[in-house]
Image (spheres, rainbow, N blue to C red):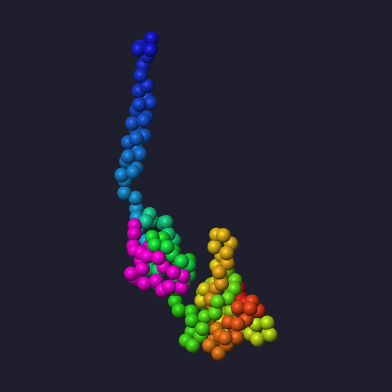
Amino acid sequence: MLVLSKPPYLRWIAAVVLVAAAFAWDMSRRATELAPFAARAIDRGEVIEADSIAWKPAPVGLFRSVQVPMGTAVVRIGAGDPITEGMVSTGDHVPDGWWTVPMDVPPAVTPGSEVRVVLADGFGITGVVVEPSREDTFGVRTDGLVAVPGDAADIVAVASTAGQLVVLFEP
């Protein structure tokens, strides 16, 4: 009796159509655009130059904006990693004659923002944020950088090391 039953033609046709559709989808050209990737490992604080970037095709819309990411690396970028807006601080935020001092800066402050650094003795000075503090996926917090005038850099650095200062900012 099994010999006299009808073969499952519809299932065979459905399987062939499914395989053909998958093959067509795989062979179709997807829209891509060139996006910046790190050609080599870039350390935090290092200036990103043209030879540090490798342009590779990526699906359209994968990155918010695709432009030349020239500036300073805010985080360490591994070789082959995509370079996005948040990884690069553009522009030079350190005025001439000023020094950058590592200190705990609120993460909400953007580079280039003006802050007020108040020491434990009440002495206050205006500074410019070069890089806010960051927290990695394990909760380890790294200090940010604030540029201060050269004549007050020593006092601010000692207070920062001792943890005796507060960074104020206006949102």
* Nearer-the-camera pick, 123 or 101: 101
The boundaries of the magenta stretch are: 36-57
Quadrant of the snapshot with the C terminus:
bottom right
Q: Quadrant of the N terminus?
A: top left
The residue sitting at 34% across, 28% down in the picture is 13
Residue 55 in magenta stretch: yes
Q: Measured from the top left, where is residue 112 in percent x and y?
A: 51, 77
Q: Is residue 93 above or below residue 79?
A: below
Residue 118 location, quadrant: bottom right
Query: Do we see residue 74 in this rendering?
Result: yes
- Residue plotted at (58% across, 76% down): 103
Which residue, as the protein is rendered here, is positioned at the far bottom? 151
Q: Nearer the viewer, residue 95 or 99?
A: 99
**In which image quadrant can residue 70 be found?**
bottom left
Residue 149 rendering spot, x and y as whole percentages: 54, 87
Q: Does residue 57 sit above or below 164 in this rendering? A: above
In this rendering, does residue 83 appear at all? no
Q: Is residue 135 left or right of residue 76?
A: right
Q: Residue at x 32, y 39 (%)?
A: 23
Q: Residue at x 34, y 55 (%)?
A: 32
From the top left corner, tell me how far across and down residue 45 is, in percent. 46, 73
18 vs 96: above or below:
above
Residue 107 in percent (x, y) is at 57, 69
